[in-house]
Image (tube, rainbow, N blue to C red):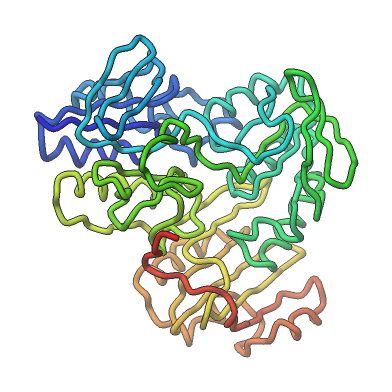
């Protein structure tokens, strides 16, 4: 009987179990969540924070699901060592659990950027349930939160904290908001929403040191300025892979994998944010909590069953609220070779629309306060319909003639605009990327 061990509580675990158990009722499956929580939906974490829902609403499946699928769950014993050569997991009580294949879908912790004080209480990450619960517990006494995390989830958290009348400082080491997810014009519009919500932005600066004894008290910036705070959200972290440090596993800020999410060691797989890079084009620039990540579980399950995997990777669609603004980001939303951009801005009503077109088909879009067009544009992306005669109607510009970026900048600030730019200097998004 083949034995599968799974580490982590990524939502991809559920599709992995479904694929494995659907084909083999005798297979041995052991799950090590590496926390007290079952696999959960990371994209619902901010909603959980805002509404204080129950954990059952956050979990992908209840306990009964794992009982029904005969998944043994080990939560009460800490992992002390993993031997990839001898294929066993050693626990703190000196017991051992053997495996034929290991799937790493999460780690016990993260490795933050190297600077003094990053292990203090109050240093958190936006995509981790334990840390979101910590913030909920801090709310009655905490007034100031600092965020240095260039992710959509951190952005949602910033607005959610602001709506609870907390002081929020957003630290941006560069000169643009979320540069790996948004183009400059979209980032500027969202930055204006942040200012309107009272979120203070610190540009072209970053944290140099975290101050306090055991608990976070303040942060010192590279500029030398000090800001007092009660909690700090950090991003740019890498998974903590110390359990594999003495192995032959190939790692580079994560576990390097191929198109099957298989490492250089045939019996070891990795999914989600444990991977060293985004593998497929539809996963590129996609937060770890999207539906596209969940599909990795089915691919790994097929590989473990030695079946041909179906690359049914969903179009990444992220819809969320930033204060009173509704935001939808779908598909590819960064400049690329032969990509044309069309946008319209209505400052008075805080409406922003931007679509990205390649080969006369829409490949991505950003909609702010325009939810009524979400389904239409989603359909056009999925069906790859030609849109040459529909662009002006979709974007809602005043005329059908696209303008250059320079022309658009000269428009009156409150006047809806439409612009087209073709960018040739950015990297192509490939269907697959090779390990570097």
Left or right for 21, reference 350 = left
Q: Residue at x 74, y 20 (%)?
A: 215
Image quadrant assignment for residue 212: top right
| Viewer-nearest residue: 251 or 21 | 251
Q: Where is residue 56 in the image (x, y as percent from the top left)?
A: 41, 24
> Split into 4 quadrants, where in the image is the N terminus?
top left
Left or right for 165, reference 305 = right
Q: Which residue is drawn at 82% across and 49% down?
A: 202
| Viewer-nearest residue: 349 or 318 | 318
> Split into 4 quadrants, where in the image is the C terminus?
bottom left
Q: Where is residue 398 in the image (x, y as percent from the top left)?
A: 66, 82
Q: How many labels does the image show?
A: 0
The correct choice, above or below, for 333 with respect to 319 in the image is: below
Left or right for 152, reference 76 = right
Q: Residue at x 39, y 63 (%)?
A: 434
Residue 10 seen by the camera: no
| Viewer-nearest residue: 417 or 222 | 222
Residue 279 seen by the camera: yes
Image quadrant assignment for residue 134: top right
| Viewer-nearest residue: 206 or 316 | 206
Left or right for 277, reference 182 = left
Q: Position of residue 138 (x, y in %)?
A: 69, 21
The correct choice, above or below, for 392 with respect to 209 in the image is: below
The correct choice, above or below, for 327 with respect to 414 in the image is: above
């Amino acid at each position: 009987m083949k034995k599968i061990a799974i580490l982590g509580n990524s939502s991809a675990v559920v599709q992995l179990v479904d694929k494995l158990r659907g084909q083999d009722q005798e297979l041995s499956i052991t799950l090590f969540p590496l926390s007290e929580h079952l696999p959960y939906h990371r994209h619902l974490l901010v909603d959980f924070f805002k509404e204080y829902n129950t954990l059952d609403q956050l979990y992908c499946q209840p306990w009964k699901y794992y009982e029904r699928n005969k998944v043994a769950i080990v939560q009460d014993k800490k992992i002390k060592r993993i031997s990839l050569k001898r294929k066993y997991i050693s626990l703190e009580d000196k017991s051992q659990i053997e495996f034929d294949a290991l799937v790493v879908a999460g780690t016990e912790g993260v490795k933050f950027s190297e600077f003094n004080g990053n292990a203090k209480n109050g240093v958190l990450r936006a995509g981790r349930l334990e840390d979101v619960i910590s913030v909920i517990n801090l709310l009655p006494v905490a007034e100031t939160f600092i965020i240095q995390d260039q992710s959509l989830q951190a952005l949602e958290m910033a607005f959610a904290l602001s709506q609870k009348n907390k002081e929020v400082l957003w630290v941006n080491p560069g000169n643009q908001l979320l540069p790996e997810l948004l183009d400059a014009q979209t980032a500027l519009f969202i930055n204006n929403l942040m200012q309107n919500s009272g979120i203070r932005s610190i540009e072209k600066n970053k944290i140099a040191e975290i101050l306090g004894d055991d608990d976070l008290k303040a942060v010192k910036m590279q500029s030398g300025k000090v800001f007092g705070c009660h909690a700090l959200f950090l991003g740019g972290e890498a998974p903590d892979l110390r359990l594999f440090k003495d192995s032959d596993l190939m790692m580079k800020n994560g576990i390097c994998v191929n198109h099957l999410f298989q490492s250089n060691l045939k019996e070891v797989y990795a999914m989600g944010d444990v991977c060293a890079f985004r593998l497929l084009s539809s996963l590129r620039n996609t937060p770890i909590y999207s539906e596209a990540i969940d599909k990795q579980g089915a691919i790994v399950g097929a590989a473990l069953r030695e079946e041909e995997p179906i690359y049914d990777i969903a179009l990444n669609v992220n819809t969320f609220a930033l204060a009173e603004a509704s935001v939808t980001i779908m598909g590819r939303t960064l400049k690329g070779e032969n990509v044309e951009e069309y946008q319209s801005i209505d400052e008075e009503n805080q409406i922003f629309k931007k679509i990205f077109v390649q080969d006369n088909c829409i490949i991505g879009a950003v909609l702010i306060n325009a939810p009524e067009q979400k389904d239409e544009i989603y359909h056009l992306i999925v069906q790859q319909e030609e849109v040459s005669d529909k662009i002006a109607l979709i974007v809602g510009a005043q005329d059908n003639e696209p303008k250059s970026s320079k022309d658009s900048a000269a428009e009156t600030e409150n006047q809806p605009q439409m612009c087209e730019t073709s960018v040739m200097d950015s990297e192509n998004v490939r269907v697959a990327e090779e390990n570097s």
